[in-house]
Amino acid sequence: MTSTANSSGRPLALVTGASAGIGRAYAERLASDGYDLVVVARRAERLDEVKHQLESRYGVSVQPLVADLSRESGRGAVDAVATQPRLEVVVDSAALAYYMPFLDLPRDQAEELVNLNVLAPVQMIHAALPGMVKRGKGTLVSFSSLLAFSAASENPQMPKRAVYAASKAFLLTFFQLLAIELRDTGVRVQIVCPGIVKTEFHTRQNMDLSGRPRLEPEEVVKASMIGLELGEVVCIPTLEETDRLQHHDHAEGEVLAANMRPTLAQRYLT
Ligand SMILES: NC(=O)c1ccc[n+]([C@@H]2O[C@H](COP(=O)([O-])OP(=O)(O)OC[C@H]3O[C@@H](n4cnc5c(N)ncnc54)[C@H](OP(=O)(O)O)[C@@H]3O)[C@@H](O)[C@H]2O)c1
């Protein structure tokens, strides 16, 4: 990503989920591109490691922000950074899955999922966007998942995922519609939908996917960066035939367009 120097020397990027996985890899890539960083997660010692490594490798400034984004106080702390005038890039990578049948998902974990995966990015982007639009410059990246496309799949090998997959489908729709609203503002938005990536995401849930082919987090970041240059709003790092995505969007549009009428379908007319 090309950065623009300003009065304080370097542009600023805000990266959540930067203590591990894709967020950590994105933070490193942005540091190597000359961005100062605010890195957000709950584990302070991990963020300190990120700070020391990236500052010594790339000569940028890295500010750790320990915050639990599933809590109002944590989201408030991030808002304060999101409104800083030299903020150019926001990368939202913090998330959890809690794969299990919905009936087994404790209510507090269901709330945590929605707060972290949905409310946190919406609030952070709501805080960051007015300044970016005013400055005519900015980039917002968030991570959905291939599971955003899994609502109709009954594949028993897939994890039980109702709230997680729905949270990722929310982000997909949110970013696609934001992209339309923000056209011609100078602010770029991108939602990335990876398959399986080699991070702590699954081991956190005691899932061992080490036998499965997985992307490296750095490869996902590379796809995101190149996707931004290509103008991709939806970046699916492993998608070869991009017309599949166009067909998917087209099919959705047809359901919408064909049914915007004030008449009940025949089978409901008894
Ligand atoms: N890995 C995959 O296979 C995969 C596939 C599709 C999509 N994704 C998506 O990619 C994104 C990144 O995932 P990843 O694979 O990099 O996962 P990861 O290795 O588990 O990293 C998740 C990050 O989120 C942070 N985090 C978790 N809960 C938090 C909270 N309450 N407040 C603040 N930070 C929190 C974690 O740090 P702390 O624990 O220190 O807070 C960590 O830095 C997520 O949106 C995920 O849904 C991942």
Image (cartoon, grey):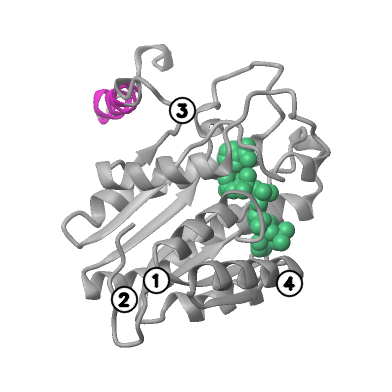
Cβ atoms under marks 3 and 4 closer than 8 Å = no
Q: CA distance from mark 4 to mark 1?
A: 24 Å
Mark 2 residue type: Gly
Mark 3 residue type: Thr
Q: Which residue is mark 1?
A: 128
Where is residue 139 shown, x and y percent of the image? 34, 60
Cβ atoms under marks 1 and 2 closer than 8 Å = yes
Q: Which residue is mark 3?
A: 238
At mark 1, the secondary structure is helix
Number of numbered labels in the structure image? 4
Task: Classify 10 Å Cα crowding around label 2: few (below 14), some (14-19), many (20 and above).
Answer: some
Which of the two marks, 4 or 1, is nearer to us in this view?
4
Q: Which residue is mark 4?
A: 44
At mark 2, the secondary structure is helix
Identify the disc placed on residue 131.
2
Task: Classify 10 Å Cα crowding around label 1: few (below 14), some (14-19), many (20 and above).
Answer: many
Where is residue 47 shown, x and y percent of the image? 67, 69
Where is residue 248 shown, x and y percent of the image? 35, 24
Residue 64 shows in this picture: yes
Where is residue 120 shown, x and y percent of the image? 56, 62
Residue at point 61%, 36% (across, down): 197
Q: Picture quarter containing residue 231?
A: top left
At mark 3, the secondary structure is loop
The image quadrant where one finds the N terminus is bottom left
Q: CA distance from mark 3 to mark 1?
A: 29 Å
